[in-house]
Amino acid sequence: MKRVYNFSAGPAILPEEVLKEAAAEMLDYQDSGMSVMEMSHRSKTYQQIIDDAESDLRKLLNIPANYKVLFLQGGATLQFSMIPMNLMKNKVADYIISGHWAKKAAEEAEKYGKVNRIASSEDKMFSYIPDVSNLEISPDADYVFMCDNNTIFGTKYYELPNTKGKVLISDASSCFLSEPIDVTKYGIIFAGAQKNVGPAGTVIVIIREDLITKDLENYVPIMLRYDIHAENQSMYNTPPTYGIYLCGKVFKWLLNLGGLEAIHKINVIKANLLYDYLDQSSMFFGTVEKKSRSLMNVCFKSTSPELDEKFIKEAKALGFDNLKGHRSVGGMRASIYNAMPTEGVKALVEFMKEFEGKNRG
């Protein structure tokens, strides 16, 4: 069976090399006589799997020793609750509203304290990243929240907010491990695995140790406390074992490619192939400001909704799958995460050229 080019925003494409390795180990992981799916998370064999995954992630991101790495469940959306529940000491937080998920995170945080929306791009349907160079940071804010890459709208921060000394928290779900970053500039980085790292069901949280507090017994459920998960090395209860195993394989795949510097160069090449075509096309056009364009999620439309539908249908028939844009914005979206081969983007551009030639005028 021929694999399609999967442009899904998530759950998304995984490296074929990783999938083949996992398939080969499905029934018997390293002579254990069982699958990782069946393995006790308390076994020495599984402990090595999760230890290796954390070690490789630390190498990839150069994570300092004073940051904990947690493998949790509930996806990135549960972090919208965990963050204010654990960090809102003053009951005040600042949120930058650059897309759907930042908006959802702010709404959830309002259950636990005052939320100040200090910048927003909702006025233009989230088609740009707001200016974050001189924000009016609340003096009593416990933290400043951002969503680094906006999956639905296809935008990306290229300048970190000036938080004026306040803790910066980033939802990095759809750009995690796509480029080098300086972890020390953040208090928390979290990411749902299913977009750029692994299968659905795992969320990765990188948290500075001084933000982990213990005085939460009376009002935060035990499974929503960072201190509990940190003390138990992500094993307070049964973690998403198979998801962590696959994330670990993706980490090794990235290290073997040359790390985040190497994958970033590839990602820039892939994105430029598609954006360069969109910029010269008379039928297709990008939907966000050029300075805010995401390398991971390329959103575009044609000259009519009818052509959009025809394009999506014909593309799918040829093996270009999941190109339909999010229901809230329409059009098309090509999610070209780390695992999308350059050949896939080249093939998509060639099809777009052919489609434009056949449907012009």
Image: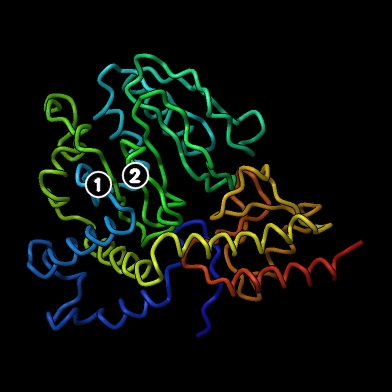
Q: Position of residue 25 (x, y in %)?
A: 25, 80
Q: How many marks?
A: 2
Q: Secondary structure at mark 1?
A: loop
The residue at the point 48 percent across, 22 percent down is: 117
Q: Is residue 346 left or right of residue 8?
A: right
Q: Are marks 1 and 2 in contact (CB under 8 Å)?
A: yes
Q: Which residue is mark 2?
A: 183
The residue at the point 32 percent across, 22 percent down is: 142
Q: Position of residue 24 (x, y in %)?
A: 29, 83
The residue at the point 40 percent across, 68 percent down is: 258
Q: Residues within 10 Å of mark 2 (few under 14, many from 20)?
A: some
Q: Is residue 12 above or below residue 222?
A: below
Q: Quadrant of the C terminus?
A: bottom right
Q: Which residue is mark 1?
A: 64
Q: Position of residue 139 (x, y in %)?
A: 38, 14
Q: What's the distance in space between the residues labelled 1 and 2, CA to CA?
A: 8 Å
